[in-house]
Image: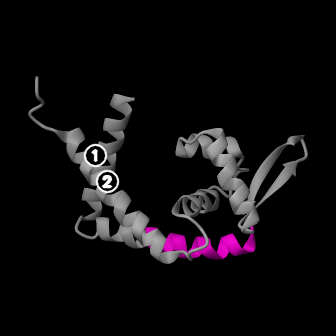
């Protein structure tokens, strides 16, 4: 039976539009030496400065295989964007730390993402934004 209200379809379409806009904004903000995926990794690490970030965190956050994340991190290390630093409790574990170069790029990435976020919210009142976020959280909770 076909749903009278294709909410999921509309959310999916909106998600793709927003993803394209964010990707384009990020791509325009970064230099040609890094990929959009690397930019998102930099942004994720920047947003989580309150904790150590490990390769496994990136695999879970971005839904990528270990080999893909490992290759990306190797390339980021070669480009002087990250350092892998051993943690005292377990020398096998290496936390991922941004270099100064990546920290500077992070500022550009944040501005790019914020510009798209502002554009999304500018036609909504503050109450509408809160209502929309509450509805999205409710939907996400109900279908997980």
Provide the secondary structure element on which disc 2 rests.
Answer: helix
Q: Secondary structure at mark 1?
A: helix
Magenta span: chief secondary structure: helix
Residue at 52% x, 63% y is 36
Q: Position of residue 134 (x, y in %)?
A: 32, 45
Note whether 100 is above or below 20 in the view shown: below
The structure residue drawn at horizontal position 21% and vertical position 42%, both measured from the top left corner, is: 9
Image quarter in which the N terminus is found? top left
Asked if marks 2 and 1 touch (Cβ < 8 Å), the reply is yes
Q: Is residue 63 left or right of residue 53?
A: left
Question: What span is colored magenta in the figure?
Answer: 99-113
Residue placed at 75% from the left, 69% from the top? 80
Q: Is residue 98 visible?
A: no
**Does the magenta portion include 107?**
yes
- The residue under label 1 is 12
Work out whether residue 106 or residue 34 is closer to the camera in this orientation and state it: 34
Q: Is residue 90 toward the left or the right of residue 119 in the image?
A: right
Mark 1 crowd level (few <14, some 14–19, many ≥20, 10 Å Cα): few
- How far apart are the two marked residues, 2 and 1, measured between alpha carbons? 6 Å
Would you say residue 120 sits in the magenta stretch?
Answer: no
Seen as rendered, the residue at the extreme top is: 1
Which residue is at the front of the view, 120 or 42?
Answer: 42
Query: Where is residue 41 shown, x and y percent of the image?
Result: 60, 57
Residue drawn at x 26%, y 46% is: 11
Observer-nearest of 2 and 5: 2
Q: Which mark is residue 16?
A: 2
């Amino acid at each position: 039976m076909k749903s009278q209200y294709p909410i999921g379809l509309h959310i999916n379409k909106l998600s793709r539009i927003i993803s394209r806009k964010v990707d384009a904004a990020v791509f325009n903000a970064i230099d040609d030496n890094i990929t959009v995926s690397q930019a998102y990794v930099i942004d994720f690490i920047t947003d989580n400065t309150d904790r150590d970030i490990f390769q496994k965190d990136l695999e879970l956050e971005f839904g990528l295989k270990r080999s893909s994340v490992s290759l990306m991190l190797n390339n980021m290390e070669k480009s002087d964007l990250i350092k892998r630093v051993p943690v005292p409790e377990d020398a096998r574990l290496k936390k991922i730390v941004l270099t100064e170069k990546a920290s500077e790029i992070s500022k550009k990435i944040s501005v790019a993402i914020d510009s798209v976020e502002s554009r999304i919210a500018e036609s909504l009142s503050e109450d509408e934004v809160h209502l929309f976020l509450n509805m999205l959280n409710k939907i996400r909770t109900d279908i997980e």
